[in-house]
Amino acid sequence: MSTPSKPAASPPSGPGFDADFRARLHELFVWRRDVRRFRGDPVAPGLIEELLADATLAPSVGYSQPWRFVLVETAERRAAVLENFRRSNRQALSAYAGERAKLYASLKLAGLVEAPVHLAVFCEENTAVGDGLGRQTMPETLRYSVVMAVYTLWLAARAHGLGVGWISILDAEEARRSLDVPVDWSLVAYLCIGYPEAEHAEPELARAGWEQRQDPAMSILKR
């Protein structure tokens, strides 16, 4: 007597993302801005922890999870970073001349004074997690993984009505020393987080006339 065969197991199904969700996701991409103008309203500590947990869902090479988050809360350390920015910004300005220099000098390039939350994001260069998988030939993918975590946090923050500003006009090694973190941690991003003064779908640099968005087709090659 033959044994009745079991019905074939159904393949696991993933979450359903419908057209409405995809439209809202595109809207989130559009409204993600590099914010420099913040209101003074505080951000609930629990929300920051939630955003950081979301950030750790980002992909990482070899599942190395090399991101390290430092909440910069003391006035002395914030003041050191602010002075670092001001000095670096003066140096950056000297690279421009004429009308371009005037325009650069008029730009607001950081919300370090106003933002209630300062977050430094580092890459632990010598992490043993992941046992080097995937980064033997391209070690820079370790830092790329941290960038993915930053962008994940950026989108999650925007979904909560928060703005994020990425401060790149810094001496990264000086910032590392000011924050007293291990020498094998490399600064990837210094972020200002808070509620924006105003909402804009268009980037501030585009509104100021510094640069305009390029046609996406210009970035696509076929071989």
Image: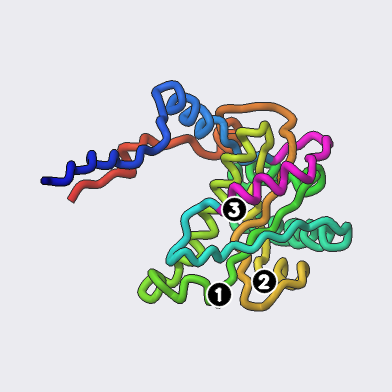
Q: Is residue 18 above or below residue 157?
A: above
Q: Is residue 20 above or below residue 179?
A: above
Q: Residue 11: x percent and y percent?
A: 30, 41
Q: Foreground: 4 or 174? A: 4
Q: Which residue sits furthest left?
A: 1
**206 left or right, relative to 22:** right
Badge 3 or badge 2: first in the primary sequence: 3
Judging by the rendered image, the residue that carries numbered circle 3 is: 96
Q: Nearer the viewer, mark 3 or mark 2?
A: 2
Q: Amino acid at mark 3?
A: Tyr
At numbered mark 1, what does the secondary structure look like: helix, strand or loop? loop
Q: Give residue 218's mark.
A: none
Q: Residue 154: x percent and y percent?
A: 59, 43
Instruction: Characterize the local packing of mark 2: few (<14), some (14-19) or many (20 or more) Cα atoms within 10 angstroms.
Output: few
Badge 3 or badge 1: first in the primary sequence: 3
Instruction: Characterize the local packing of mark 1: few (<14), some (14-19) or many (20 or more) Cα atoms within 10 angstroms.
Output: some
- Which residue is depicted at the point 57% across and 36% down? 32
